[in-house]
Image (cartoon, helix red, strand yellow):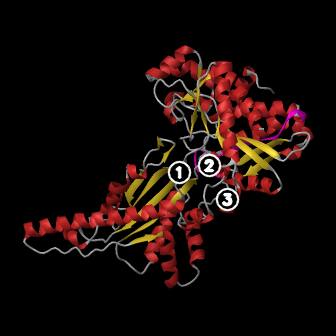
Amino acid sequence: MDTSRENIYNLLLDLVKIPSVSPGEGETRLAEFIHDTLGNLPYFQEHPNNLCYIPVPDDPFGRKNVFAMVEAEPKTNRTIILTGHIDVVDTKEARSLEEVMFDPEEYTKRIKELDLPEEAAKDLESGDYLFGRGVMDMKAGIAIQMALLAEYSQKPEELPVNIGFLAVVDEENNSAGMRAAITHLAKLEDQGLEFVACINSEGVIPKYPGDTNRYIDIGTIGKIMPFFYCVGRESHVGQYYAGLNANLLTSAVSMVLEGNPEWAEVWKGEVYPPPASLKQKDLREIYSVTLPARAMVYFNHLTVTSTPAEILEKSMEVATQAFEKAIQHLEQSAEEFSQKANAPVPVPWKSKIMKWQDLFAEVSKTFHGDLDTYVEEYIDNLPDGFDEREKSLAVVGELIRLYPDKNPMIVVGFLPPYYPHKTNKRETDSEKKILAAVEEIIKEAKDEFSETMAISEHFASISDLSYLGFQGEKEELTPLASNTPGWGIIYDIPLDDLLKLDIPAVNLGPMGKDAHKFVERLELDYSLDVVPKLLKSLIQKLA
């Protein structure tokens, strides 16, 4: 196995034909294929302990990551990790060609049977694009990294650093694979390895129509999901002002936070998107002419500087503003209604805002028994079809049921998943070295390949590079755990191990377009001819 175009291309086809849709058993099959392929290399036959699986704990599909390392000779502790995810999203958007999408050559031949967007049709006509699920997101990157590892394994005596390779599952879902890998990396660090850098090879997309730049990301964006669980007061709609509609509270939260530009984070002149609601609904299961007493809304927020502690406090402020806005709305409505009806209509409600950890503490005071045990058993009995977010919200609902105070309130906390940001702040020596090496690569791309490359401060589509460390203090991170319902049972990140790590991150990958869409495609010439050489050069410079 080597880094020739033909070899990488054929390996890419082999990787794509295994439908590793996340979450599912296909991820396990692909991990086994990668493990076996690397295991056939002479180096790993001679060093079998340098190739292993990292299982995802308690995974219903038996999923596992693959970790391999070629050790430099003479020995050194300095190590560069190559990483990427092996899972993909489903192919339903391909409709009649759904199954064919895992056969890129056949799919590329037949995709014209579908109604293609204009740009995709032009790219197909050019002959320089391969269409298929996962070709750019991100099995081309995995193929390049595997080929590089195989080349390095042939001459470890020429390596200035150890080269690790980490293929992870579940990136497209909850990043269970990389969360499992955190502890493995922390153990390697405890054993003396010094991580110089971690290089991801996620597919890179143009930033705007007609963009011909190639990008190297020197950080990755973070993601956090604050929730607002709103408790109103039930009442028959015929006695409207006797109750408080929980939907009014969630609507007020959305009015305050949805698209709020004050929350949009900024780094090096680049402004990132504001919060967006991912789900908003009342929590009543049947039709009724009663005002809904419970509703919830949760948001996606992208971070490049903010910590969970900061987001929690800002979310509390949002809840306070929203509750006051709802009361003001009701008071105005009641005043106008009373004039129209010629009868007084009081609005007795006062705002009450609680963090999840405070609700848990309050319920603990009056609960007979061990509340932690009760919650664990409650989670075990939740329907199998519930995802992590539904389970967490169900726990909130159960504790509100147990809470003696039945007045309206908003409970604030977090839902999974959480992705810390990795921002190159140009503060540490390792960050400065990453930047210097990337600048050299940009010059090399221009001089050697006539390619115009540019630095991107963050990989903006969320990546597993997030779990290479936390940029902040422990007290800025722990509010995440204490305010995520069901933490440690429903969802978990090994926070102590995460805090140990501080691995500089960079993303240098192939180019493509329309990830997750039926016209996902890989730009062949640049991706297969140029990227492997630039990646090899970047490794050399970092080493």
Q: Residue at x 28, y 64 (%)?
A: 326
Per the image, the residue denoted by label 2 is 466
> What number is the disc on residue 499?
3
Element type at marker 1?
strand
Q: Earlier in the sequence, mark 1 or mark 3?
A: 1
Query: Amino acid under label 2?
Result: Ser
Residue 475 vs residue 87, the one in the foreground: 475
Per the image, the residue denoted by label 1 is 223
Asked if the magenta segment contains residue 100, the reply would be no
Residue extent of the magenta highlight: 157-176
Asked if the magenta segment contains residue 164, the reply would be yes
Residue 507 falls in which quadrant of the image?
Answer: top right
Element type at marker 3?
helix
- Where is residue 392 drawn, in percent x and y? 52, 63
Residue 153 falls in which quadrant of the image?
Answer: top right
Q: Earlier in the sequence, mark 1 or mark 2?
A: 1
> What number is the disc on residue 471?
none
